[in-house]
Image (cartoon, helix red, strand yellow):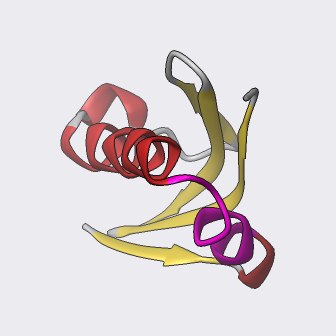
Amino acid sequence: MKVELIQRAADVLFDVPDEVHEEIIKLIDAVASDPEAQVPDLAAAFGEWCWLVYIIHGDVIEVLDVGCAR
């Protein structure tokens, strides 16, 4: 699957510490590889400290928001 980040999500992703950045990337990879996470509606994925909000358009994951609690 192709991944697209809206600018706001990309800004957050590249402005967080490395360990948090890695967790967000793992969440994106998990969504891309799990057919059950690929729902056609607005969805979210949560890690230990981070989350992402996304929507699937065909074979594209559009990441709308990312965040971290630390």
Whole-percent x, y for residue 6 in the image: 70, 78
Position of 24 relative to 34 (above/below): below
Residue positioned 72% across, 76% down in the render? 11
In the rendered structure, the answer to whether residue 18 lies left or right of residue 63 reads left
For the C terminus, the image quarter is top right
Whole-percent x, y for residue 58 in the image: 40, 68
Q: Quadrant of residue 62?
A: bottom right
Q: Nearer the viewer, residue 51 or 19?
A: 19
Q: Quadrant of residue 65?
A: bottom right
Position of 24 relative to 10 (above/below): above
Q: Nearer the viewer, residue 2 or 28?
A: 28
Residue positioned most to the left: 33
Whole-percent x, y for residue 56 in the image: 51, 57
Residue positioned 49% across, 38% down in the render? 39
Q: Nearer the viewer, residue 4 or 48?
A: 48
Inspect the magenta stretch and tell me whether residue 20 lies in it: no
In the image, the segment drawn in magenta is: 9-17
